[in-house]
Amino acid sequence: MITWDRFESAVRSYPEIANYDQSYEELMGNKELIEILKTKPGLKEIHKVIEFLNRWRCRIKSGNESAKILLSVILENLQLLNILRNYNIEHVDFDKKTYGNNFDLKVKDFIILLYSKFRHVHFKFGATATAKILHILIPELFIMWDNDILKNYQRRNIGVSDSAPGYVDFLISMKSLAAEINNKFKSAELHLSGKGKDPASYLSIVMNYNPPKTLAKFLDEYNWVTITRNNV
């Protein structure tokens, strides 16, 4: 069972043992770039995203060919991305019916559509890279993973897999973890008072993150530290 102290200890240790945190802060702190990615990105912005992904060992081929393919997927799915920006991992109802892309579907079905679009681009773009780019595009909802994290959660829930429905099952597990962390945070209010009203804002304040990180990002850091690195 997770405790607040264990969660906080894991995410506090993350910058010390991860080689990627600075590149994440640089990318997400570029407000102009992030805003353009939400509206109408071009090749310049996509090259920066690919550079970021390759710092995280995603091994995407550099050059205009890969960038053009990735750009086309983003542009083709802007409406769907905008729909899903209304949700975060704490409060998303995966079974809620919503309308978009000329379909009336559940939120989880739109996630499946979006994950599939990126997972099956016409060059090497694996499960890790897919989850990372989805997080960049909607950092409140999508959570990054790697093979170790995927396999760990698959042992707990056979539905988790390297597939679009499998990623949804992973997010469902993450929503449950987010609820548990929020509850632990509330019970720790006595020594956390005055530094944020929720786990993400508290941790962003005490760790001097600007812009603040989302709970979805802190969940990834907890998974990475405790599963991939087997620390804490």
Image: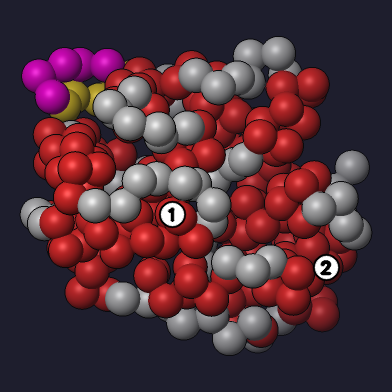
Most common SS among magenta residues: strand
Q: Quadrant of the C terminus?
A: bottom right
Q: Which mark is residue 53?
A: 1
- The location of residue 150, given as percent across then percent down, is 66, 31
Of marks 1 and 2, which one's residue comes earlier in the chain?
A: 2
Q: Please tell me whether residue 28 is drawn above or below residue 231 in the rendered image.
A: below
Would you identify the image quadrant in which residue 114 lies?
A: top left
> Could you tell whether 24 is left or right of 191 in the image?
left
> Could you tell whether 209 is left or right of 69 in the image?
right
Q: Amino acid at mark 2?
A: Ser
Q: Amino acid at mark 1?
A: Leu
> Could you tell whether 26 is left or right of 40 in the image?
right
Name the residue at 66% across, 34% down: 147
Name the residue at 29% across, 28% down: 121
Q: Nearer the viewer, mark 1 or mark 2?
A: 1
Q: CA distance from mark 1 to mark 2?
A: 26 Å
- The location of residue 141, given as percent across then percent down, is 44, 45
**Proximity of marks 1 and 2: CB atoms separated by less than 8 Å:** no
Q: Classify mark 2: residues with Cα within 10 Å, few (<14), some (14-19) or many (20+).
A: some
Q: Quadrant of the N terminus?
A: top right
List the residue tagged with mark 2: 9
- The location of residue 210, given as percent across then percent down, is 46, 82
The magenta-colored residue range is: 101-105
